[in-house]
Image (cartoon, rainbow, N blue to C red):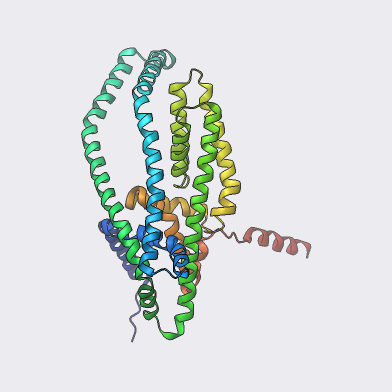
Amino acid sequence: MLLKLPFYAKASLLCAGMYFLISMLYIGQGLLLPLIFGTVIAILLHPMVCFFERKKINRIIAILITLLLSVIVIAAIALFMYSQLSLFSKSWPLIVEKFTNLANQAIQWLPGFLDISDVKVNAWIAETKTELLDNSSSAIGQTLLSVGSSMVIIFLIPVYVFLILYYKPLLIDFIHRLFNAGRQNQVTVIISQTKSVVQRYLVGLVIEVVLVAILNSAGLLILGIDYAILIGILGALLNLIPYIGGLIAVAMPMMIALATKDSPWFVLYVIGVYYTVQLIDNNYIVPKIVASKVRINALVSIVVVLAGGALWGISGMFLSIPLTAIIKVICDHIEPLKPIGFLLGDTMPAIGLLKIKSSKKKTNQ
């Protein structure tokens, strides 16, 4: 005899389960993050491994060649970024000095504009400086800890990628063994579509980053903004964080333009360039290349990005959309979970139009 629980009991159990799940995800992020990154990257690199295997290359050698090529590409990009950052660091004192002069001019102008005494403005600035200095040591410590944990993740990810690619048949067979014989076809479809969604989505993201970086850099070079290529690439990477990264990305060239250019009009020119790039990205690149691979509506995207950031930081923001896409594929193929898949998607039902048409029919009658 099944025990029937009242609604409040079911709701309490659901909330308790969600609380423990989120707690375990937060506590186990040191283990889960490299494992999830490794799984996603392994899915992305799997077609290349299959290509080498079709050339009659041993599976282990094919995986090692794929990893080596990936490391070479990433290392080349990292060296280029490092060279650009080293040049930027040499000019950093000059940029800080110019910002200081601009801040001093603003301080002299602010009391007269807001009718505030100079004493109050200077006291507020002194208090703010003191708070920044007091918090700087703890911020540096947290930064060192985050960098240390990131290095651990960076070294673990290639190991996970290799093992996941090598044990792929074992893992897929294990997933099939979790379900009875009548569900095998459905499980095969879910695995195939999940792999396809992740592969096409990640490829689409890479193409988007390259195109946005080219457009950003070209626009900034035309304006004569210093370190245009570096800022353009960083802006394209930040653009991967939906809705939030774009705001941070445009702030960097605005600050550089304000500090290095004599005319403040260049700030507006930078905004115009990034606005044009965002129009191209949102109306052509994303719909044609990225959004067509993963159909997640804007509301869910914002919520999962913020939730991922609160749970796992920047890594959670980057992983939020691919993980949501995987969840949607699974929900779309399981009958009781199809409403959740529908909620995550971007298909808008024409409910309003149906109501209008039905009301018109009644009035005509």
Q: Residue shown at 37%/41% (left/top)?
A: 79
Q: Position of residue 256 (x, y in %)?
A: 44, 27
Q: Position of residue 322 (x, y in %)?
A: 44, 58
* Residue 335 appears in view: no
Judge whether residue 155 can be spotted in this image.
yes
Which residue, as the protein is rendered here, is positioned at the far bottom? 1
Q: Point out the residue furthest to the front here.
A: 56
The residue lying at 45 percent from left, 81 percent from top is 183
83 up-or-down from 31: above or below = above
Front-lying residue, 122 or 145: 145
Report the quarter where the N terminus lies.
Answer: bottom left
86 in relation to 38, above or below: above
- Given residues 160 and 353, the one toward you in this image is 160
Q: Name the quadrant of the C terminus.
A: bottom right
Q: What percent of the width, then of the height, locates residue 319?
A: 40, 55
Query: What residue is at 54 percent from the left and 44 percent from the top?
Result: 211
| Residue 16 locus on image (x, y percent) | 30, 64
Which quadrant of the structure image shows residue 133?
top left
Give the image quarter of residue 65.
Answer: bottom left
Q: Nearer the viewer, residue 328 or 221?
A: 221
